[in-house]
Image (spheres, rainbow, N blue to C red):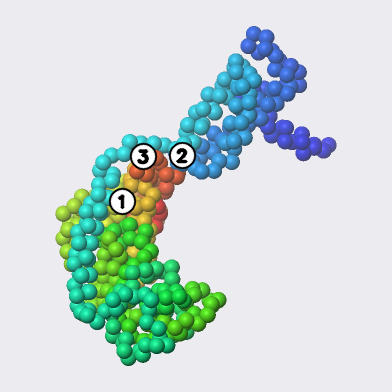
């Protein structure tokens, strides 16, 4: 016997409703003192209940988080709305309305009152940025003074390479105000550059291939990690540089060079300024070939407003996650590393990943959320023998437990802690996120999955 696709669809609609107590019937039924539900109305009730149940399940799976797209929201609410407009006094419709209202409210996500302490780190970051920028402004003024009178009075229009000899311009300083990095970065036949200018005003090609650029760039990255997460919002830089050469390039990013050959003056960076943020210099005597103005003072300035400086040996998993979050918000990189499993920091690649995810965490606490709460830890034994497990403790003697424990090797415990992240308005963002922590041999807990967002 074959069952048609349409019959299966009707059966699928009817089954969820039966679970809710809306029994199907081929004949009319009387409810509420004589109100008769005909077959068409019953089917509409079944369908509305089915889609509403799907929407409720979606909301439940989101676990308090916000969602921009719901599969069943419109189908469910539209059906309930139409039924309520036609049969507002029907008990079944009233029940659907109550459920729809509750599901819709929950779908907007959890909300909590924002505490001032949650956003204090942003205030302190702003104060620190102002102090470092004050140092940067002074350093930039000194750099310009150091160039003396050998500075082009204006960068554009650029001197015409057809009319000006390189030797007349070599070593001359120029200030480039509209350096769009990495937007105008390109790889040419003679090197890696940022193009500054246009055909009508001439070009400068800011050289990116040497330490004169890499040193200040790395210093700016350190500034972002140590001081100012908002630096990612900046795409226009100011550069003081020296003219060192002239070359011809097609100043277009990408492998396909669709444009004409343009002559431009090659400029070697001397100082890099991100207006309102930082000034960085090439320093051949520095360990990293570069420094930013005020760098030597940053650590002392930050030390005074760290709220957590050490991790107790007996720290609980949920508390360790709070410390981990605090280290990120307060830009305490050493404390951040101290929270993380040492086994995940052993190689140069591992340490590079550590910094990469530090930058991502900084960006999220700058642009997305300001705080996270942490639930109780669920602890289990991931490796080795669990002597304290209920049945092991009940059925095995202490001697046998000790023998098995020695045979199984060092015990590794796993803790799972869930976080809920909140934005500046107190809205929960997304569903709770799972974090894994590990403890070996009864020692201290460490964050193992440090990459996870909050």
Which residue is pictured at 60% across the width and 15% down the height? 89
Q: Which residue is mark 3?
A: 426
| Mark 1 or mark 2: whose residue is earlier in sequence | 2
Looking at the rendered structure, the secondary structure element under dot 3 is loop
| Viewer-nearest of discs 1 and 3 | 3
Q: Element at badge 1?
A: helix
Front-lying residue, 406 or 114:
114
**In the rendering, at what x and y percent does residue 88 appear?**
60, 18
Lateral position of residue 77 relative to residue 242, left or right: right
Q: Is residue 339 above or below residue 3?
A: below
Residue in view at x 45 percent, y 41 percent: 65
Tag of residue 325: 1
Point out the frontmost of discs 2 and 3.
3
Residue drawn 46% across the image and 39% down it: 63
Residues under numbered marks 2 and 3 in contact, where contact means CB atoms less than 8 Å apart: no
Q: CA distance from mark 2 to mark 3?
A: 16 Å
Task: Work out whether 238 lies above or below 212.
Answer: above
**Residue 254, image x, y percentages:** 51, 74
Binning the other alpha carbons within 10 Å of mark 1 as few (below 14), some (14 to 19) or many (20 upward) gives many
Q: CA distance from mark 1 to mark 2?
A: 21 Å
**Horizontal arrangement in the rendering, residue 257 relative to residue 420 (left or right):** right
Where residue 236 appears, x then y in whole percent? Answer: 36, 65
* Residue at image location 54% in from the left, 38% down from the top: 58
Q: Is residue 380 left or right of residue 280?
A: right
Dividing the image into 4 quarters, which one contains the N terminus?
top right
The reply, left or right, for residue 253 in relation to residue 241 is: right
Who comes first in sequence, dot 2 or dot 3? 2
Q: Confirm whether residue 51 shows in the render.
A: yes
* Residue position marked by numbered label 2 in the rendering: 63
């Amino acid at each position: 016997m074959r069952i048609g696709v349409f019959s299966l669809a009707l059966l699928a609609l009817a089954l969820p409703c039966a679970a809710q107590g809306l029994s199907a019937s081929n004949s009319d039924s009387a409810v509420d003192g004589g109100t008769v539900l005909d077959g068409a109305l019953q089917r509409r009730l079944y369908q509305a209940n089915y889609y509403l149940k799907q929407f409720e399940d979606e909301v439940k799976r989101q676990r308090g988080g916000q969602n921009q797209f719901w599969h069943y929201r419109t189908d469910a609410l539209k059906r309930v709305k139409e039924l309520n407009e036609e049969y507002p006094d029907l008990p079944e419709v009233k029940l659907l309305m109550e459920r729809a209202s509750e599901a819709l409210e929950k779908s907007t996500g959890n909300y909590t009152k924002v505490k001032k302490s949650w956003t204090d780190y942003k205030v302190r970051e702003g104060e620190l940025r102002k102090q470092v920028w004050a140092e940067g402004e002074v350093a930039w003024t000194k750099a310009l003074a150091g160039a003396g009178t050998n500075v082009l009075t204006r960068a554009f229009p650029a001197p015409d390479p057809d009319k000006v000899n390189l030797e007349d311009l070599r070593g001359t300083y120029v200030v480039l105000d509209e350096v769009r990095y990495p937007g105008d970065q390109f790889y040419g036949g003679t090197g890696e550059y940022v193009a500054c200018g246009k055909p009508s005003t001439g070009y400068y090609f800011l050289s990116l291939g040497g330490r004169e650029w890499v040193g200040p760039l790395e210093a700016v990255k350190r500034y972002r990690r140590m001081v100012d997460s908002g630096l990612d919002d900046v795409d226009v830089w100011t550069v003081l540089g020296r003219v060192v050469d002239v070359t011809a390039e097609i100043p277009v990013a990408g492998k396909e060079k669709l444009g004409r050959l343009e002559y431009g003056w090659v400029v070697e960076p001397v100082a890099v300024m991100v207006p309102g943020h930082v000034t960085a210099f090439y320093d051949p005597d520095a360990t990293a070939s570069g420094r930013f103005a005020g760098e030597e003072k940053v650590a002392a300035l930050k030390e005074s407003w760290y709220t957590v400086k050490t991790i107790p040996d007996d720290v609980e998993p949920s508390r360790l996650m709070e410390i981990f979050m605090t280290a990120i918000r307060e830009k305490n990189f050493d404390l951040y590393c101290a929270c993380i499993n040492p086994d995940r920091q052993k190689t140069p690649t591992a340490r590079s990943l550590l910094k990469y995810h530090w930058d991502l965490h900084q960006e999220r606490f700058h642009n997305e959320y300001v705080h996270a709460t942490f639930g109780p830890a669920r602890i289990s034994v991931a490796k080795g023998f669990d002597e304290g497990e209920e049945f092991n403790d009940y059925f095995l003697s202490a001697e046998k437990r000790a023998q098995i424990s020695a045979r199984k090797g060092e015990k590794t415990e796993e803790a799972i802690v869930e976080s809920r992240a909140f934005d500046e308005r107190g809205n929960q963002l997304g569903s709770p996120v799972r974090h894994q922590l590990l403890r070996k041999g009864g020692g201290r807990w460490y964050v193992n999955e440090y990459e996870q967002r909050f």
